[in-house]
Image (spheres, grey):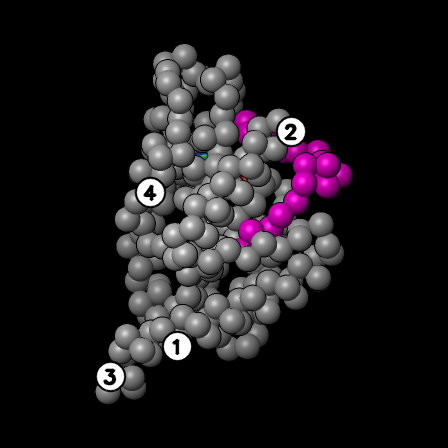
Amino acid sequence: TSATSTPKRGAFILLEGVDRCGKTTQVSLLVKHLLSLSIAAVAYRFPDRTTQVGGLINEYLQSSVQTDDRAIHLLFSANRWEAAPKLVDTLARGTNIVCDRYAYSGVAFTSAKRAEDRSSMSGGELTLDWCMSSDVGLPAPDAVIFLDLDQDEAEKRGGYGGERYEKRELQMRVRQRFAELQSIDEKQGRIPWHVVDASQSVEEVQARIAGIVSNIIERVQTDTAQLG
Ligand code: DGP
Ligand code: NA
Ligand code: NA
């Protein structure tokens, strides 16, 4: 009965992948595409370097100073938590969110660090469980669109910018961690993943994503209607 007074909630669509997979380009193309169809949509990006916490993350990424890996992990997580009220509010107002990275990147990047690369201050293994715990309770995405690109293809796209994580071996382990996170989600059956071959042209990837997203938005709106 409240269908006319309660706006349908927006869908939370997350794009994830290794560095250079084309996420940032696709996020902005997807938002433009949705807006061109008069579907409310807004882009978010993590890390959000514009906040105070984001400023610390930015300094960390651009330096080679050893910093405790757990402390850094928690900063990335805090950067998502500080945005959480805005995310919830945006969705509640019926605006779809298209997000460039989120907690999956948090877990994939931190857990991909090897003992020998890590700060001596923070011993022990950075397990998936430990890495996931600081993001428990964040607004959950309705779907993950994973832009899959192998490392050789990523490197063909030109040199990295020289930030801390932009190294071949690490990126290869990050891709493996993403695959593990995908299989965890598939076992739980809660958050669906859509893997897109990111080696195709920008236009082909965009078309694939647009098709996937129209189904996600339709599903979320149907669910919302049923809940109402
Ligand atoms: P970007 O601005 O999307 O290029 O991301 C910056 C770098 O930080 C990139 O190499 C991926 C990495 N990253 C993104 N989110 C997290 C996170 O939550 N934790 C860690 N450790 N790294 C992250
Ligand atoms: Na980057
Ligand atoms: Na990016």
Q: How far apart are marks 1 and 3 (CA)?
A: 14 Å
At 62% from the left and 55% from the top, the residue drawn is: 196
**Mark 3 burial class by Cα count in 10 Å: few <14, some 14-19, many 20+:** few
Q: How far apart are marks 1 and 2 (CA)?
A: 42 Å
Q: Which of marks 1 and 4 is nearer the N terminus?
A: 4
Which mark is on residue 222?
1
- Residue 171 appears in the rendering: yes
Identify the element where label 4 is drawn. Answer: loop
At 51% from the left and 18% from the top, the residue drawn is: 117
Which mark is on residue 135?
4
Q: How far apart are marks 4 and 3 (CA)?
A: 33 Å
Q: Which residues make up the magenta segment? A: 145-168
Along the line of sight, the residue nearer the viewer: 108 or 74: 108
Identify the element where label 1 is drawn. Answer: helix
Residue 122 is one of the magenta-drawn residues: no
Question: Residue 132, percent across and down?
Answer: 36, 38
The amino acid type of the residue labelled 3 equals Ser
Q: What residue is pinned by disc 3?
A: 2
Horizontally, is 163 left or right of 155 in the view?
Answer: left
Question: Residue 47, percent across and down?
Answer: 44, 42
